[in-house]
Amino acid sequence: MPAPLERLIADGLLRVEGTTHRTTRRWQGAMARAARHLVESGERNEDLRVPITFALIEIYGADCPDAELVELIDAIGPIEAAELGARRSA
């Protein structure tokens, strides 16, 4: 299995801009669908890992091994948090 960041890039969820990883429209769409699902289901958890997990399961399927899913969450989590911070301050 490739390193989590390499896999996320290869799968079109992240792109590299200079020395920074940025999310793609594909990832942003999956996150929007995850957020919508969570809001509609009444979920009020503020933990960013929850929608990230939903988005990754949408993309990779429910049969994605737990250990692999955790690595992907750990890899994309800080990037998504930075992206959200940048969007909120813009």
Image (spheres, rainbow, N blue to C red):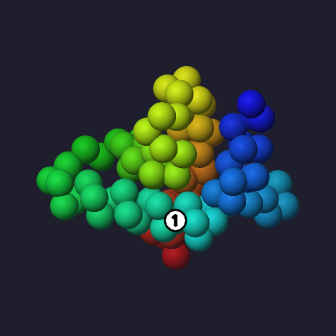
- For residue 24, which quarter of the picture? bottom right
Query: How many labels sit on residues?
Result: 1
Residue at image x 48%, y 67%? 29
Give the residue at x 40% y 65%: 32
* Residue type at numbered disc 1: Gln
Question: Residue 7 versus residue 79: which sits nearer the camera?
Answer: 7
Q: Secondary structure at mark 1?
A: helix
Tell me where residue 78 sits by quadrant: top right
Percent of width and height locating residue 52: 45, 47
Q: Residue furthest bottom?
A: 90
Residue 74 visible in the picture: no
- Residue 37 location, x and y as percent? 28, 58
Quarter of the figure that contains the N terminus: top right
Left/right placement of residue 7 relative to residue 45 reads right
**Whole-percent x, y for residue 9 in the image:** 73, 53
The residue nearer to you, when weighing 66 against 20, is 66
Q: Farthest residue in the right direction? A: 18
Rendered view: 52 above or below 84 = above
Point 54% across, 45% down: residue:
60
Q: Give the crowd class for mark 1: few <14, some 14-19, many >=20 residues within 10 Å.
A: some
x 79%, y 63%: residue:
17
The x, y position of residue 81, in whole percent, is 51, 51
Instruction: Kindly give the residue lying farthest to the left in the view shown.
Output: 42
| Residue in the foreground of this view, choosing between 65 and 22 | 65
Residue beneath label 1, please? 28
Residue 35 appearing in the image = yes
Residue 45, compared with residue 13, is above or below; it is above
